[in-house]
Amino acid sequence: MDQAKRLRTAMNQMQHPQEGIPIRSMETIAHCPRVISVTSGKGGVGKTNVVVNLALAFTRLGKKVLVLDADLGLANIDVLLGLVPKYTIEHLFGGEKSFSEILLEGPGGMRILPASSGVSDLVDLNETQKLFLLDEMDLVAEEIDVLLIDTGAGISSNVLYFNMAAQESIVITTPEPTSMTDAYALIKVLSTQYQKKNFMMLVNFVSGEEEAKGVYRKISKVADHFLNCLSLDYLGFIPVDEKLPLAVRYQKPVLEIFPQAPSSRHLENLAKAVFERPMKSTENGGIHFFWKRLFQSQKNREDERGTV
Ligand SMILES: Nc1ncnc2c1ncn2[C@@H]1O[C@H](COP(=O)(O)OP(=O)(O)OP(=O)(O)O)[C@@H](O)[C@H]1O
Ligand SMILES: [Mg+2]
């Protein structure tokens, strides 16, 4: 069969599942959880708050959410939510707990893998442990619709790995020139060294839409000029809002305790905007591919180091 015919047959089968496409494949196509990283060049721009509030907003849209705290330097999603982790991945590999059991449960039923549970060790597993983890992930993947990752800030290798492995990335910046240049630097490294070409931009700490779009236009203009084939979409903004730091002090998502606050309303709309965007492709999507890409990117780097 020639290539065009194979493609037509495959398309036809997707439209007419009764005509022979295996049930398992259809399930896989229908259930491909989105994997979204939330990242920034500069620290302190609002990533962790965006992650917990978007996660809560997603649960309210009926999505099942898993949050991965991959900020290995200053992990604090559990602190932000007033939760106390009980188990670590040691319990998982020791066979005492399943992956599902080491997750914390947060507002709206979101589940959280806190950094303190040993996320940093995930980047340093042996082959048997990786395969075991992939199997465990596959079990959890069936139960979730979106994996949201707080990557931490900067261009350290872990931030780059987690971003590179995620299918979609939200880059947060503020109008501060240092935050904008650092956001650009991160996008540049990811696109030139890791072939990541699709980004969403979220502008935080602004007075309104005009300021946010001005920030986006500046970064996007430079990216268009210097970086090849890059898609940098404007996702939206969050205004400066005194209720947000107040919610942090109560260790609750602002969306939960101040639902009418300006930041809450914007976060809710941002969550809808994320799901209204069509996924660029379901190819290589999902959780299994995320972990595989994560492990592979580390291996490549180790191999490179070994050959230098
Ligand atoms: N729109 C906003 N209005 C007012 N304060 C905000 C806003 N967004 C975030 N903040 C405040 O900024 C501080 C930093 O937020 P957050 O911890 O979410 O940033 P981060 O990017 O995760 O930081 P880090 O890089 O250190 O992990 C918090 O005290 C938070 O309350
Ligand atoms: Mg943070």
Image: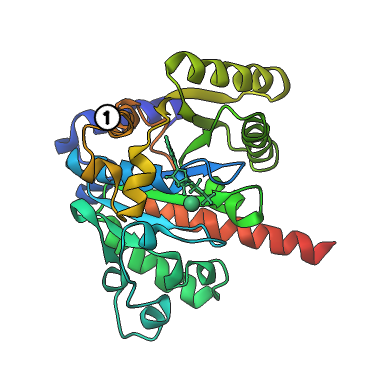
In the displayed structure, 9 sits above or below 307; it is above
Residue at 40% x, 27% y: name it. 239
* Amino acid on which disc 1 is placed: Arg
Q: Is residue 211 visible?
A: yes
Q: Nearer the viewer, residue 184 or 32?
A: 184
Tell me which corner region of the image, top left, top right, bottom left or bottom right, holds residue 306.
bottom right
Q: Quadrant of the N terminus?
A: top left
Residue 67 at x, y percent in the picture: 35, 54
Q: How many marks?
A: 1
Judge the density around disc 1: few (<14), some (14-19), many (≥20) Cα neighbours within 10 Å: some
Residue at 47% x, 13% y: name it. 210
Quick one: SS at disc 1? helix
- Compared across the picture, whether 259 is left or right of 231 comes to left
- Compared across the picture, whether 285 is left or right of 63 comes to right
Q: Nearer the viewer, residue 227 or 77?
A: 77
Q: Is residue 33 visible?
A: no
Residue holding disc 1 = 265
Tell me which corner region of the image, top left, top right, bottom left or bottom right, holds residue 134.
bottom left
Tell me which corner region of the image, top left, top right, bottom left or bottom right, holds residue 216.
top right
Residue 16 at x, y percent in the picture: 18, 31
Residue at 48% x, 70% y: name it. 130
Q: Nearer the viewer, residue 167 or 218?
A: 218
- Compared across the picture, whether 44 is left or right of 224 comes to left
Q: Quadrant of the C terminus?
A: bottom right
Residue 179 at x, y percent in the picture: 62, 35
Residue at 37% x, 57% y: name it. 80
Looking at the image, the residue that sits furthest to the right is: 308
Q: Is mark 1 within 8 Å of ligand 1?
A: no
In the displayed structure, 4 sits above or below 36; it is above
Colour scheme of the rendered structure? rainbow
Looking at the image, the residue that sits furthest to the left is: 18
Residue 62 at x, y percent in the picture: 17, 42
